[in-house]
Amino acid sequence: MTPIGLAHLTLLQLSPPELVSTAAAAGYDFVGVRVRAATAGERQYPMTAGSPMSCETRRRLDDTGVRVRDIEFLALGPDTGPGDWQPALDAGAALGASTISVTGADPDSSRLTDTLAALTADALAVGIRPTLEPISYQPVCTVAEAGAIASAASAAVLLDALHVQRGGSTLDDVRALDPDLVPVLQLCDGPLAAPARLDLPGELPLGMTADGSVLQVEARVQRQLPGEGEFPLAGLIAAAPAGTPLSVEVPHASLLASLGPLEFARRNLECVRALVNAHV
């Protein structure tokens, strides 16, 4: 059976221990945990290795059988170095994580490759592998470019259905990746074409600013549940290596507010299971 997980961005208002308990109650196999805030305005959970929250998260993982696959999030810019990533790696190792999600925020691909290679060396020392995610509004935005850089740096690629669609990549680009480069596939849905504009909810989510681009707003607060939009998700699952674990990354501010965290998590899991069953 294909493992299905819950990415932290889906329920970012939950602390890591709360995320684990909610994922377990909803029936997920694994979670992705934010041990490092992705934006300046986002809440930084105190997840330093050995901290009370880290220990509580570890206890709930052990009690429920849910595991942490990935930790996040690190943007690799021109000046990113060990001081930026080592605390996150240590925090992830304490949780038993196997990957750390990063994005290519450096327009110099050669320098970015060197930075990612240095991160990979440090990460592998604690049993973690970096996954470079092509993001539609970052310098590394296509699957092909992310694959080339990750391969050169001995890292992997994190595929996200939204950014595959919005970054201009194709299913052939996904099929062209070495299967070893794809440890997980993040699922969400949306319209085929990017909206011309999006209205922000009345209360902005953590880390979201009113001047964010349409792509950023969509990515952080207005994704659709898998199977309820127009993305070719069945084709994307088929294009990825067989048995690739699937992770729900569906931040949807208004639907979450109406359903509550547990029911929202359950609804997403039902949607992904329906897609998997249809694919089989």
Image (tube, grey):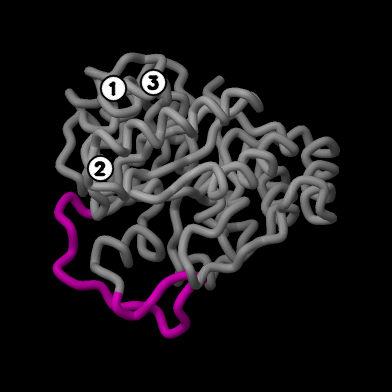
Q: Can you identify the residue that label 2 sits on?
A: 140
Disc 3 from disc 1: Cα separation: 13 Å
Q: Is residue 138 magenta?
A: no
Q: Which disc number belongs to residue 239?
A: 1
130 sits to left or right of 97: left
- Give me the C-alpha separation between circle 2 and circle 3: 16 Å
Read off the magenta span.
191-211
Q: Residue 156 at what x, y percent from top left?
A: 41, 26
Q: Which mark is first along the chain, 1 or 2?
A: 2
For image coordinates 36% across by 50% down, the residue present is 77
On screen, 30 above or below 47?
A: above
Q: Mark 3 highlights which residue?
A: 181
The residue under the point 51% across, 55% down is 10
Going by the numbered disc 2, the residue's amino acid type is Val
Q: Residue at x 41, y 20 (%)?
A: 154
Q: Is residue 203 magenta?
A: yes
Whether residue 176 sits left or right of residue 2 in the image: it is: left
